[in-house]
Amino acid sequence: MVPEHGAGLDGDRFQLPGMREIPTPALTHVPVMLKLFGPGLTRTNTEQKPVKVSHNTSALAITDAIYKIIAQQPFSTGKYEPEEVADSLPMSRPVAENERVVMMEVNGEFYLQINRGDWRPYKDK
């Protein structure tokens, strides 16, 4: 499940509340959830708490997670290790783009390029 980024209700110094023209981290850094269910399916770790990925990933991590879950054959064995899947997802640096704007993180700071112009630091406050 990949959620829509919403309407950008807060806004910042680059765009008004409700606008989504600039793909800022507030709009594009969103949580994603995967849930595996089926008859007789149980996790080896019986605590059943959600597993959280602590590093930045991209939409490609969803495909990677599905592949790694299938490789564990949970529907044949009835068991799977979501912690192993979460810990091995590929790390990605944040990058967001639309037809006019690119937003990229470099060394912990975000940079913005509008209409293929010069890159400039993005400060949301």
Image: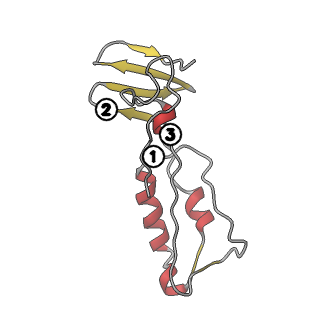
- Residue 113 spot, x, y in % from top left: 36, 19
Picture quarter with the C terminus: top right
Task: Looking at the picture, tell me which residue is in the foreground, 39 or 70.
Answer: 39
Q: Measure the alpha-carbon separation of dots 3 and 1.
A: 9 Å
Which is in the foreground here, disc 3 or disc 1?
3
Q: Is mark 3 on a helix, strand or loop?
A: loop
Q: What residue type is labelled 1?
A: Ser
Q: Residue 98 carries which label?
A: 2
Residue located at (44% from left, 28% from top)? 104
Q: Which mark is residue 29?
A: 3
Q: Measure the alpha-carbon separation of dots 3 and 2.
A: 15 Å
Residue bearing the label numbered 1? 58
Asked if labels 2 and 3 touch by Cβ distance under 8 angstroms, the answer is no
Residue located at (60% from left, 57% from top)? 87
Would you say 10 lies left or right of 19 here?
A: right
Upstream in the sequence, badge 2 or badge 1?
Answer: 1
Which is in the foreground here, disc 2 or disc 1?
2
Q: What element carries label 2?
A: loop
Q: Which amino acid does label 2 sit on?
A: Asn
